[in-house]
Image (tube, helix red, strand yellow):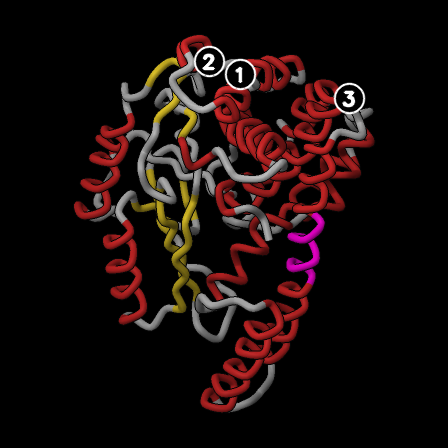
Amino acid sequence: MRPLHLVAFAVFALSSLSGCASARYVTQAAAGQEQLNGRGVSIEEVVTEGRLDKRTRELLAHVPRIKAFGERHGLRRTRNYERFVRIGRPAVVWVVSASEPLRFRPRTWSFPVVGSITYTGWFDRREAVSYAKDLSGEGWDVDVRPSQAYSTLGWFDDPILSTMITEGPEALGELADVILHETLHATFYVPGQSTLNESMASFVGDTLALEYMDETLGDDSEEKQAFLEQRARGERRGKVMRSAYEELAKLYAGRFPRATKLAEKKKIVERLRAELSVKRPLTNATFIQYRTYGSGKEEMAQLWALCGRDLPRMLTALDRVREVASRSRPHTDPGVLLRPVIAGGCS
């Protein structure tokens, strides 16, 4: 499973949100963003004046280097991640998503500029749970999960949050991954194609984080090995989730009574929870989010190789995706969007 802190949540352009977004959502998003705007201490000051523990200072010292590394590889220069904010809670937002209960069709929300997305982010967990209950009452399968980071795609100056500093030797890889992931959102974004956006950011974050650690610490560093081991664990869980997804999709496509499908779905999900030792509920909305962050990997790897593992060239080639996306349904599988680009070459 992709680390949950890699969920991007666009809370920009709040004043221009149309009637498609409830006042309840807009109010909490505006208030939550305002709490972060202008808060915190400059990372340079934190590092030089010793206000935090040594480990945190050492990790924060990497932030400007990671940003510079990303810029050298074609990512947009932003004023993000120049401040550090301690937020005093385990997550910065709680992400609510929903799906039809017997079909992998997500509930979508529409916003100006960003277009259609398949999730909403809430700064207050109680608000997120309350909204999820409302959606459940409407008959949706609902998922609520924490996110340790988000992106405003350059509309605000995003800080480094205390929730982005994880425990363990993999922390540097995680920090580099999330910074590069979110900076990719500020560099490349296709409205209405959240699956493509998240999958591409995940691919770039993973790939460049490893290259950053190679360049900074060496190929055989403890930090890199810990990051690789954590990612391998996530990929193993992801394969199990993908297998269950396919089993459920086959069930939903079958000509069985609704009650039979629901009963069999419950068996599959409970078996999966036991296999993975998962305490939280697993719903169709959960499975869709796994798909969102892992789709199109083969095509992205092909394009990356075709472009000589050169991100600026890859980003130039990706400009052609916008034309393909304009003729496609929202949230189309990234592989479908990328194949015409690959066929056209990288130049």
- SS under mark 2: helix
As drawn, is 158 to the left or to the right of 104? left
Q: Main secondary structure of the magenta part?
A: helix
Instruction: Give the label on residue 179, or none.
Output: none
Query: Looking at this view, is 44 or 160 the one in front?
Result: 44
The amino acid beneath tag 2 is Val
Q: How many labels sit on residues?
A: 3
The amino acid beneath tag 1 is Ala
Query: Looking at this view, is 223 or 210 the one in front?
Result: 223
**Which residue position holds label 2?**
47
As drawn, is 91 to the left or to the right of 188? left
The percent position of residue 154, horizontal first and vertical second, equals 41, 22
- SS under mark 1: helix
- Which of label 2 and label 3 is nearer to you? 2
Decide: marks 2, 1 in contact (CB < 8 A)?
A: yes
Highlighted magenta segment, given as a residue range: 232-239
**Which residue position holds label 3?**
347
Q: Residue at x 38, y 44 (%)?
A: 90
The percent position of residue 75, horizontal first and vertical second, equals 59, 19
**Which residue position holds label 1?**
61
- Which of label 1 and label 3 is nearer to you? 1
On the image, which quarter does residue 134 sit in? bottom left
On whether residue 70 falls in the magenta region, the answer is no
The amino acid beneath tag 3 is Ser
Q: Specify which label sits upstream in the sequence, 1 or 3.
A: 1
Q: Residue at x 69, y 23 (%)?
A: 212
